Amino acid sequence: MVFEYIKGLPEKERQDFIWDKIIYANTIKPAETLEKLDKYKPLVTYDNIEELKKIKKHAPHAGLALRIRVPNTGSMVELSSKFGAHPGEAVDLIIEAFNMGLVVEGLSFHVGSQCTNFENYMQALQLSANIIKEVETRVGRRIKILDIGGGFPVRYDHKVKAFKVLAKKLNSEINRLFPPDMEILAEPGRFIVATACYSVAKVIGKAVRDGKMCYYINDGVYHTYSGQVFDHCNYPVWAFKEGPRQISAVFGPTCDAFDTITLAAELPELEIDDLVYSENIGAYSHASSTCFNGFPPATVIHINRER
Ligand SMILES: Cc1ncc(COP(=O)(O)O)c(C=O)c1O
């Protein structure tokens, strides 16, 4: 539907479209952002009636993709309790959007981040196929885009199966369930950026506590290592130095004990100013402690109280 429509537009207007390039996939969007985006006719996701009303009011030119809730079993980061329409209400939410004069272009799902249980994808594809079929039967509208989300697992260790194993399963199930002209999108996050970064930090203090060597470094769980808390991901700490290793604790620099990176790093004896590093720390680390998802931190306003 939309792609044929875009192709038929004059060049200048065609350039204004971003439906075919970008999807705004957070199902909860600030009204001001929708207003700014509307002129670009974005593709946006939704999973509830209030969001639908907001989109109708602030971005009536947007194309829509309904996000459904799918099993996130065993994924490192569970997303399904926060996002996604229950599959049982999906068709009604799609019909509601059409009745409001909006266009539902697609269906989307997310199986949870770092999904090593590939069965989640299989179930999500089957649920999607059922919904798409029911929409066609009930209202004769075709859903043309299927967004299979993120979740593609990074090989943090060799227990994680190679991506090609998942890709093979996905391809064969997609071919079985959907027509060849179904537009398939994906939103890989972690899979692309996790292995892109190392973090390097400096030892700023050391002590022996209860017989264990403890190092204090100038980065911690409130900064680059935030993924240890929010993402349930472990980032082993390594030294650049060689030498006999002992089990050591590594703490972040802040003044609370929660800021503990690990109690079991295998490190040689380090001195103050030595450097340590962690691998595969490109996802949900530095970005999560800045303007994550484009939402800025709270503004600090100083108030002078007049007496
Ligand atoms: C809507 C959406 N798309 C894509 C991603 C990226 O997921 P992942 O990092 O698991 O690939 C996320 C992560 O939370 C997300 O919420």
Image (cartoon, rainbow, N blue to C red):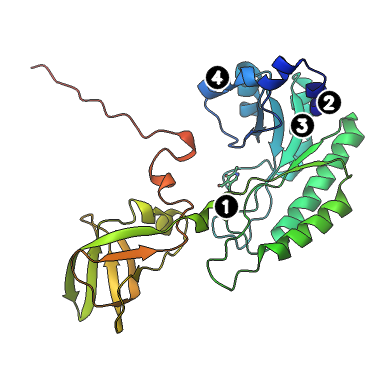
**Callout 3–callout 2 Cβ contact below 8 Å:** no
- Cα distance in 3D space between marks 4 and 1: 28 Å
Question: Which-is-in-front pick, marks 3 and 1?
Answer: 1
Residue assigned mark 3: 105
The crowding category of the residue bearing disc 2, from other C-alpha atoms within 10 Å (few below 14, some 14 to 19, many at least 20), is: few
Q: Is residue 287 left or right of residue 307?
A: right
Q: Who's the residue at 77% across and 61% down the image? A: 168
- Some atom of ligand 1 lies within 8 Å of the CB belonging to the residue at label 1: yes
Question: Which mark lies nearer to you, 4 or 2?
Answer: 2
Q: Find disc 2 in the rendering and name its residue.
A: 4
* Labels 4 and 2 touching (C-beta < 8 A): no
- The location of residue 185, given as percent across then percent down, is 72, 43
Residue 14 placement: quadrant = top right
Q: Which residue is mark 4?
A: 36
- Looking at the picture, which amino acid does disc 4 mark? Lys
Which kind of residue does numbered mark 1 sit on?
A: Ile
Q: Is residue 270 above or below residue 119?
A: below
| In front of the other: 61 or 14 | 14
Residue type at mark 3 is Glu
Q: Nearer the viewer, mark 3 or mark 2?
A: 2
